[in-house]
Amino acid sequence: MIYRSCWVACFDLLGFRKKVDRNQLSFVLEDYREVLAAIKKETHGDVRKRWFSDTFLFYLLDDSKESFLAMDSYCRRFFRRMILKRIPLRGSLTTGKFYAESDDILIGPALVEAYDYAERQDWLGFTLTPGAREQLKRYETDGKTVYDVLSQHYYQDYDVPIKSGRQSESCQTENLPAYTMNLIRFAHGNQYMDEARCIWDAVVDMEEQSAMNESQDQQGLEETCMWKNEAETVRRKYENTKNFLLNTVPGLAE
């Protein structure tokens, strides 16, 4: 039983309810297991995992620099591999007070904040919270802050689209460190561009599949205001994601 400052990450699967309705849950389970097995071979640190409904939770039981490095590596790989598996999701990593009792009872401000920041994003993306950013500016490595190093390679401060109070529009943003979705952002040449294009292709494929599913759901039915709003909400998430990729990967549109 612990109650201390910890690193906590939360991921929210998009369209999960419809996958369950279409009996596609087995595909998600298989892909999820494959992703976790692959990450386990690539990372170090005993990152703890919980999955319930459309929510994935990862955490480590302290807020040290070493724990962050383990969590960050794990979360970035998880997000990237899930996207490449054509599973849309969004997530957030934070630090704060967290209560864990035998992994059965999990509660605390850090969990609430990680979930809130994951759920409010209006795209497919992975971010650090403002609190995480400030904590990383306190850690140093090789004469630089950990945040400076991360900003060079994996993250970029970006005006992340945030869901507004009205379902039909999104005009709000919050400046957050956003994962650029590039495995080696600092590299140059074809390898760098190939990495970015794999992500781009996955996002486009998910957008097309989502549009196809929406069309099938509506087939033979009169369009309703609710259906139109939902379709527009989904379209907007993918448009925001593609805009982010175009803004952070030079040459991707060529």
Image: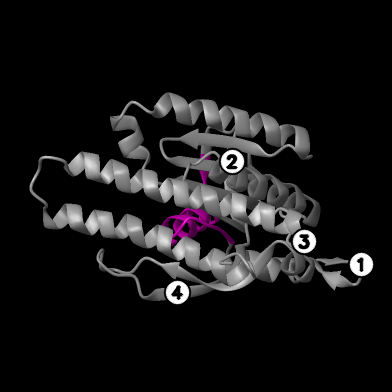
Tell me which numbered mark, 3 or 4, is placed earlier along the sequence: 4
Mark 3, Cα crowd under 10 Å, few <14 / some 14-19 / many 20+, is few
Tell me which numbered mark, 1 or 3, is placed earlier along the sequence: 1
> Is residue 217 or residue 130 the one in the foreground?
217
Secondary structure of the residue carrying tag 2 is strand
Name the side, left or right, on which 11 lies relative to 185. Answer: left
Q: Dots 4 and 2: beta carbons under 8 Å?
A: no
Q: Position of residue 172 (x, y in %)?
A: 39, 75
Task: Tell which residue pokes out farthest to the left in this image.
Answer: 222
Q: Residue at x 76, y 52 (%)?
A: 69
Q: Residue at x 16, y 41 (%)?
A: 219
Quickly name the residue at label 1: 142
Mark 4, Cα crowd under 10 Å, few <14 / some 14-19 / many 20+, is some
Q: Which residues are magenta?
A: 106-127
Tell me which numbered mark, 1 or 4, is placed earlier along the sequence: 1
Q: Position of residue 13 (x, y in %)?
A: 44, 44
The amino acid type of the residue labelled 1 equals Asp
Q: CA distance from mark 2 to mark 3?
A: 45 Å
Q: Nearer the viewer, mark 3 or mark 4?
A: 3
Q: Is residue 44 magenta?
A: no
Secondary structure of the residue carrying tag 1 is loop
Quickly name the residue at label 4: 173
Quarter of the image where the N terminus is located: top right
Tell me which numbered mark, 4 or 2, is placed earlier along the sequence: 2
Q: Nearer the viewer, mark 2 or mark 1?
A: 1
Quickly name the residue at label 3: 189
